[in-house]
Amino acid sequence: MTHIIEGDDRVSLVEMGPRDGLQNEAVRLTLPQKRELITRLAASGLQRIEVGAFVSPRRVPQMADSAELLAMLPRQGPVRYGALVPNLQGLQAAIQARVDEIGLFTACSDGFTRANIGIGVEESLVRFAPLVAEARRLGIKVRGYLSTVIACPFDGPTSPKRVAAVAERLLDLGCHEISLGDTTGVGTLGTVVPMLDAVLREIPAGRLAVHFHDTYGQALTNLIPALERGIRTIDSSVAGLGGCPYAPGASGNVASEEVVYLLQGLGMSTGVKLDALAATGQWVSEQLGRPNGSRVGRALSARRTGHTVDAQEGNCHAT
Ligand code: HMG
Ligand code: MG
C-alpha cells in the first residue's frame, strides 16, 4: 500500500466513550453495564480508556459512580484507565481509586473554564501545579486537556497563539501529553491547520493528542493535518457518544469506529479490532436507547445482520 501519511505508522487511540461519551447521555448506565462497556472496549484492543471523572456529582451525575466502577475493573494486562480530576478533592479520590492516569482540564478561554470548573484559566493553572506534582510523586501520569482550541461558546474565536501559550504552560507544569480539544466541534481545515502549526512551533508532535468533537461533521477531515504533522494520539468515542454538558450545542467526539476505519485505509495500525469495536458501539447504543452515532458502526452492523442502513436515523431495516 502507498503511504499517504509519512512517518510512524502506529496510532494510539484514547477511548473517551465511558467518560466524555456517557457524561452527556440522558440515560444513565448501571455499573454492570459500564463495566461491560469498558471490558468490551479493552477486548477490542483499546489500551487507553478514560473511564470516569472525579467531579462534583451535582454537576455531572453520570460520573458519580467512578470510584465504584474503577474498583470493579480488571487490572491485569496492558490497559490504562484514566479519569478527569478538577481539584485536590478529585485528585485524592482518584488516587484512592487507583487510576493509572489523571486528566486535568482547562481551556484557552475564561468563559468556558468558568462555566466548566468555576474559575478562570490562570487560576486553574495555579490550582493544577501542586496536583501535577503530587500525582507525579505517586507515579500517576498526568494528561492536560486544553478545551476551546478553535472557539469558545461564550468568548468566541480562539487565536492559535493563545492555544500554543496555554498548551506550553500545561506542559511546563509536568503533563506528559496535551490533548487539544475542539470542544464544540466547530473547526474546519481553515482554522485547525493554523492552530496545529502554532502549537507545533512550541511543542513536539509526540507530546500532543487531538480531541475533536464532531458537531459539524468535520472531525475526521480535521484529523488528517494532525496525522500529516506527526501527531499519533487521537481521542475518540465509541459510537460517537457524548459531548460536554457545559458547552452548549456540542455533540460527541469523533467516533472511534470512524477513526480506526480511516487509519486502516491509510495503512496505519491501531491494534484495534474494528469488528469487535463496532459490535460494542452497536451494543452500547442499544443500552442507551439511541441511534448508533457511528456510520462505520452502522454499516458494519448492517452487514452483520443483512439489513440496510438508514443513514439519517441510524436505524437498520430488514431487506
Ligand atoms: P464548585 O461548586 O465551584 O466547588 O465546583 P466548591 O469547591 O465550592 O464545592 C462545591 C461542592 O462540590 C462541595 O460539596 C464539594 O464537596 C463538592 P457540598 O459541600 O456542597 O456538598 N466538590 C466535589 N465533589 C466531588 N468531587 C470533587 C469535588 N470538588 C468539589 N472533585 C468543581 C467546582 C470543579 C468541583 C465543579 O465545577 C465540577 O465538578 N465541574 C466539573 C465539570 C465537568 O465535569 N465538565 C465535563 C468535563 S470537561 C469536558 O468534557 C471537556 C473535555 O472533554 C475536553 C474538550 O472536549 O474540550 C475534557
Ligand atoms: Mg470532550
Image: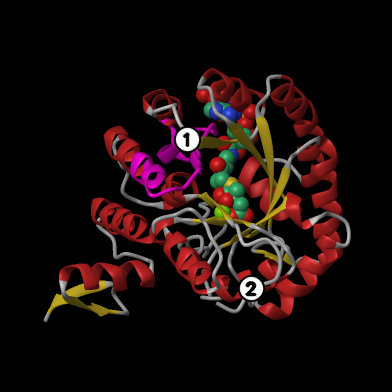
Q: Circle 2 is placed at which residue position? A: 224
The picture places residue 167, in percent across and down from the top left corner, at 80, 51
Q: Nearer the viewer, residue 126 or 213?
A: 213
Q: Is residue 307 left or right of residue 267?
A: left
Name the quarter where the N terminus is drawn.
bottom right
Q: In the image, is residue 44 part of the stretch drawn in magenta?
A: yes
> Start and end of the magenta stretch?
38-65
Vertical relation: 36 (above or below) 97: below
Q: Which residue is mark 1?
A: 58
The amino acid marked with disc number 1 is: Arg
Rate crowding at label 1 as few (under 14), some (14 to 19) or many (20 or more) other CA atoms within 10 Å: few
Tell me which residue sits at (82%, 61%) in the image: 200
Q: Residue at x 15, y 76 (%)?
A: 317
Residue 250: image location, x then y, percent: 52, 63
Estimate the x, y position of residue 227 in percent, counting from the top left: 67, 67
Q: Which sits earlier in the primary sequence, circle 1 or circle 2?
A: 1
Q: Quadrant of ligand 1?
A: top right
